[in-house]
Image (cartoon, rainbow, N blue to C red):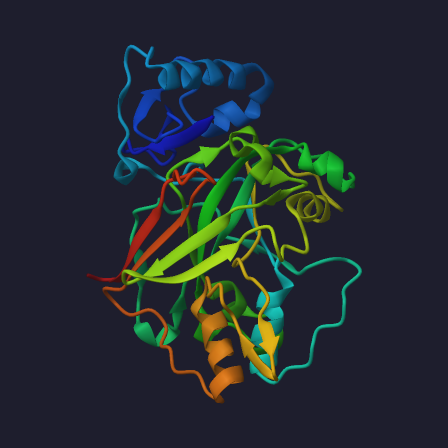
Amino acid sequence: MKLASYKDGSRDGQLVVVSRDLSQAHYASHVANRLQQALDDWNFLSPQLQDIFDALNAGRARHAFPFDPAQCMAPLPRAHQLISSEAYPSHTALLRKAAGLPEVPERAAGPEMAQCASDALLGAHDPLLCATEALGLDFGAGLAVVTGDIPQDCAADRALDGVRLLMLCNQARLRHLVPAGGAPGAAALQSWAGTAFGPVAVTPDELGEAWARGRVNLALQTGWNGRKVGLCEAGTDMEYPFGQLLALAAKTRPLRAGSIVCAGPLSNAGVEKKGQWSWPHGYHSIAENRAMEVLQDGQASTEFLRYGDTLRIEMKTAAGSSLFGAIEQEVVPLNS
């Protein structure tokens, strides 16, 4: 099923169930007012939400109304925690190589993970606010999961069973604040400019065979100012699937229902031919594209986001329908 949170003047929004084709919606207030309520009692409430979803798809929901993505907050506007991961090593390796930094030795403990702000997550149509263009605002298109309760120190397959919902995400970074080599400090914290999510969150069963072993085997599309810049396969180079990411996050502490884990900017490895590298599937962060330019041309030429720039991030099913709806954001001055 597909769930969203409609704006209602509150900080958590109103839970709605959305039809598979994203054309109709229905308030879920007689089941749960907020998504967190449903996550807290998932086994009891999700079948009731599924009944609404089935009625919507069959045209039997009496109080259905046209779904408007512009009225959506983040599906889970305030999460217990948000963890960002580096599930795609090709992204980090490319940035380090272009910066002249040594390769990171293979880590037996898995990818690096960071705790990010989760108290005011952005909706799909919320603006990207930035105090100054000089901070190097970047996008980071990828996927995320919302969890149920996951026990401490559980195996990856057990952790994967805790995935309740999948979401599209855009993790904005202020690249000029990111410390070289990932050094700690206040700038590392401040470099995370906010995270936006697609209009709807989707249960794994909606993906069918495209959801396999903690990976989503579909292409992610990213457009920048109307030009397609990325069409990468989400499952191909995901070295650390979601089950492994969740198990790592829960290694020394349990995760409570309503935790979000992001896989980081989606990235496909480059192709080498006659000593020349190319990246035919494009990019889902400007920093990665700038690294490509350094390796190809000796210097980066693409600028970071400017005021007025627009982004569109979307994932479609094998049949061509939108899975999560689209993230559509504009870069806006903070004090405009």
In the image, taking residue 232 as reference, residue 6 lies left or right, namely: left
Residue 244 is situated, as x and y percent measured from the top left of the image, at: 71, 47
Drawn side of residue 215 relative to residue 190, left or right: right
Residue 84 in percent (x, y) is at 57, 54
Residue ID at (52%, 63%)? 189
- The mark tally for this picture is 0
Q: Where is residue 98 in the image (x, y as percent from the top left)?
A: 56, 81
Closer-to-camera residue (273/261): 273
Of all residues shown, which one is farthest toward the left? 336
Q: Quadrant of residue 9?
A: top left
Work out whether residue 29 can be spotted: no
Can the viewer see residue 76? yes
Front position in the image: 17 or 82: 17
Front residue (pair 60, 132): 60
Residue 215 location, quadrant: top right
Q: In this view, does 255 lie above or below 279?
A: above
Q: Which residue is drawn at 36% across and 30% down?
A: 21
Image quadrant in which the C terminus is located: bottom left
Give residue 223's position: percent from left, percent from top.
35, 59
Q: Which residue is drawn at 48% across and 33% down?
A: 202
Q: Which residue is drawn at 49% across and 63% down?
A: 281
Task: Check the image and name the residue furthest to the bottom.
Answer: 298
